[in-house]
């Protein structure tokens, strides 16, 4: 019997890879636009690229997410037309199950409201951490900032809430990926004080938990309540947009001098001022945040059609792509020494490798790691069916022999 190779490839889902490639292409376009406007657009106000102000950022982000109602309505109309054409008008069919009849109980509504606010709180937490803790103020830095520990929380929460079963190769993969994340975090923050190290560790753990909780809930909303990715995106965006717009409107009447008062209008500082937003290039901001919303939609599609764990790969690839391109253009090639660069890319390759192992795109054929992959389970099931059929045939044959002998 020919011995299996140590590594082999599992099933390659073309739609999954098409979604990944599409998201990466949009990421590249997004970064190229930032670089273009940063270096070439001399007649355009690009202050919003240089500074992240909380209310403008959140307002534009949720505004563009709420515009995802447009593709939602388009696809809904297309699906309605297909369903209408697929059945004769004279036919009357009572469906036992209909997605349009899915209802929300009172508890479901409470959960939805809670996670709507939790997503907004998570976004505020994210911007606050970047501005006041990390002192990250530019849009390109926001793009490349990496929050650790999201993978482990996505894994744990999906297992806790949806009772998803994982196997040996997946436990090994997630354990190694978590160790890599701790090592990467350690090297990023080890140069600071002990207090600063543990404060940043706490912030990363809290944000990763909050972000993963929202993602896991959204997966359930799409899987069990049959919300489309577009509907999910625009509902969260629209509700949070209303809240932010109200805060924006109220803040516009009250100048202030605190650390949170970062917007300037008529020589006065504000926490937020709608009129100062009009002084920036609205079209460019709208373009940037629309691209971000499309990437978010693609991520939701991956989560909906596959699993929250399939978002591991797009998270890793997008972060590395954005970091590499922006570091080259904005910081030059001397940001890290050669040894550090080599180590960063080694860790990245290993991360991607174990994510692919986790998703069973790469199979490890040693130490019984491939025993519970989908391919092996399906093969065993097929073998058992054939064995049962063979036993059934043998039993039937023995019955005919016994009858013949009795005669």
Image (cartoon, grey):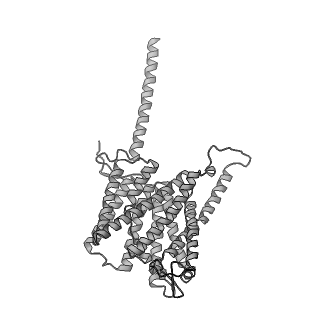
- Location of residue 390 with respect to 127 vertically, above or below: above
Q: Is residue 225 visible?
A: no
Q: Residue furthest left?
A: 339
- Location of residue 214 with respect to 321 vertically, above or below: above
Residue 339 x, y percent position in the rendering: 25, 71
Residue 401 x, y percent position in the rendering: 44, 18
Along the line of sight, which residue is nearer the eye, 393 or 334? Answer: 334
- Location of residue 335 with respect to 377 vertically, above or below: below
Which residue is drawn at the image coordinates 34% and 50% (left, top)? Answer: 169
Residue 222 x, y percent position in the rendering: 54, 55
Q: Quadrant of residue 351?
A: bottom left
Q: Is residue 75 visible?
A: yes
Horizontal relation, residue 349 to residue 299: left or right: left
Horizontal relation, residue 127 to residue 94: left or right: left
What quarter of the picture does the N terminus occupy?
Answer: top left
Q: Residue furthest top?
A: 407
Residue 161 x, y percent position in the rendering: 46, 50
State the count of labels: 0
Along the line of sight, which residue is nearer the eye, 46 or 207? Answer: 207
Along the line of sight, which residue is nearer the eye, 289 or 102? Answer: 102
């Amino acid at each position: 019997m020919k011995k299996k190779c140590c590594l082999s490839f599992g099933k390659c889902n073309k739609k999954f890879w098409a979604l990944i490639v599409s998201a990466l292409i949009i990421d590249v376009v997004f970064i190229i636009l930032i670089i273009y406007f940063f270096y070439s657009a001399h007649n355009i106000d690009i202050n919003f690229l240089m500074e992240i102000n909380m209310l403008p950022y959140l307002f534009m982000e949720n505004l563009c997410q709420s515009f995802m109602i447009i593709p939602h309505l388009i696809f809904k109309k297309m699906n309605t037309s297909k369903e209408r054409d697929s059945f004769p008008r004279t036919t009357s069919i009572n469906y036992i199950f209909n997605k349009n009849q899915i209802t929300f109980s009172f508890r479901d509504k409470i959960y939805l409201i809670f996670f709507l606010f939790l997503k907004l709180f998570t976004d505020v937490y994210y911007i606050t951490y970047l501005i006041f803790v990390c002192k990250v103020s530019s849009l390109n830095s926001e793009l490349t900032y990496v929050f650790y520990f999201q993978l482990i929380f996505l894994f744990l929460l999906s297992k806790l809430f949806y009772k998803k079963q994982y196997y040996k190769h997946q436990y090994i993969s997630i354990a190694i990926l978590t160790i890599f994340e701790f090592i990467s975090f350690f090297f990023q923050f080890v140069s600071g004080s002990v207090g600063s190290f543990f404060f940043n560790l706490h912030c990363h753990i809290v944000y990763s938990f909050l972000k993963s909780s929202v993602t896991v809930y959204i997966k359930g909303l799409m899987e069990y309540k049959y919300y489309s990715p577009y509907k999910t995106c625009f509902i969260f965006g629209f509700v949070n947009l209303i809240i932010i717009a109200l805060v924006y409107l109220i803040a516009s009447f009250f100048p202030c001098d605190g650390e949170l008062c970062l917007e300037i209008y008529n020589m006065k500082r504000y926490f937020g001022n709608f009129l100062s937003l009009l002084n920036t290039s609205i079209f460019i901001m709208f373009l940037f945040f629309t691209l971000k919303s499309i990437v978010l939609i693609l991520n939701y599609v991956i989560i909906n059609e596959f699993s929250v764990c399939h978002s591991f790969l797009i998270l890793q690839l997008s972060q590395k792509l954005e970091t590499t391109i922006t570091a080259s253009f904005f910081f030059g090639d001397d940001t890290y020494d050669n040894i550090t660069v080599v180590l960063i890319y080694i860790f990245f390759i290993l991360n991607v490798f174990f994510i692919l192992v986790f998703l069973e795109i790469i199979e490890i054929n040693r130490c019984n790691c491939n025993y519970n992959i989908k391919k092996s389970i399906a093969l065993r099931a097929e073998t058992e069916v054939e064995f049962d059929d063979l036993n059934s045939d043998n039993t039937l044959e023995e019955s005919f022999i016994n009858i013949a002998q009795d005669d």
